[in-house]
Image: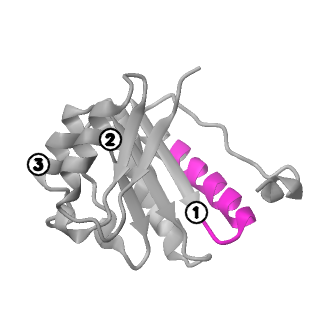
Amino acid sequence: PKLAQTFIQLPPDRGRSAPRDLEILLASLPRGIHPAVEFRHPSFFRGQRLLPDVIDLLAEHRSAAVITDTAGFRELAHVSVSSLRTLIRFAASDGHPSDRIRLSHWAARIARWHQAGMQQIDMTIHAEDPIAEIELASSFVELLNQALLRQGSALQIPVPRLYHRLQTELF
């Protein structure tokens, strides 16, 4: 079995002093672990991009950058990539129409990245309501499959479905 990416989230109050600690952590991880790091402090960014030295640090340690897309906090929705992997965290805004627009943009971008050779793209969708999460995930996969077809890709991802309400009550 293949391990998915390991999510590392830096605290929002942890600014430019964190890279040394992060470098120690990343260097200590076993070879088979694939870290994906979410930077939350504004000092890591310039113009919606991670700073070049941050990208270099991630690349040196075969680590991916987490891209966080939260309505109202789009400054964290950078599109910096440091490897052939990425992890996208999408925070829904309780059924606001902007959710579908943002998901459509991500579907198109991910289809382009896939065509360009990105090897692993993981996406998590967060919503207040667990049923809304499943509905958004289904909608996103449908949008992604359409975008992949437009890019000429034969890849089609199975659309997740809610089979029973108990699916939402596991945790």
Describe the element under mark 2 as helix, strand or loop: strand
Report the side of 167 relative to 86 (left or right): right
Quadrant assignment, res 145: top right
Look at mark 1 in the image and give the residue it sits on. Answer: 126
Nearer to me, 126 or 148:
126
Q: CA distance from mark 2 to mark 3?
A: 14 Å
Image coords of residue 106 (percent x, y): 42, 55
Task: Please report whichever mark, 1 or 2, sits nearer to the chain's N-terminal start.
Answer: 2
Describe the element under mark 1 as helix, strand or loop: strand
The label on residue 64 is 2
User: Measured along the vertical axis of the image, is residue 50 above or below residue 60?
Assistant: below
**Display coloring:** one colour
Look at mark 3 in the image and give the residue it sits on. Answer: 53
Magenta portion: prevailing SS class: helix
User: Measured along the vertical axis of the image, is residue 152 above or below residue 106?
Assistant: above
- Going by the numbered disc 3, the residue's amino acid type is Asp
What's the magenta region? 127-145
Q: Residue at x 43, y 40 (%)?
A: 121
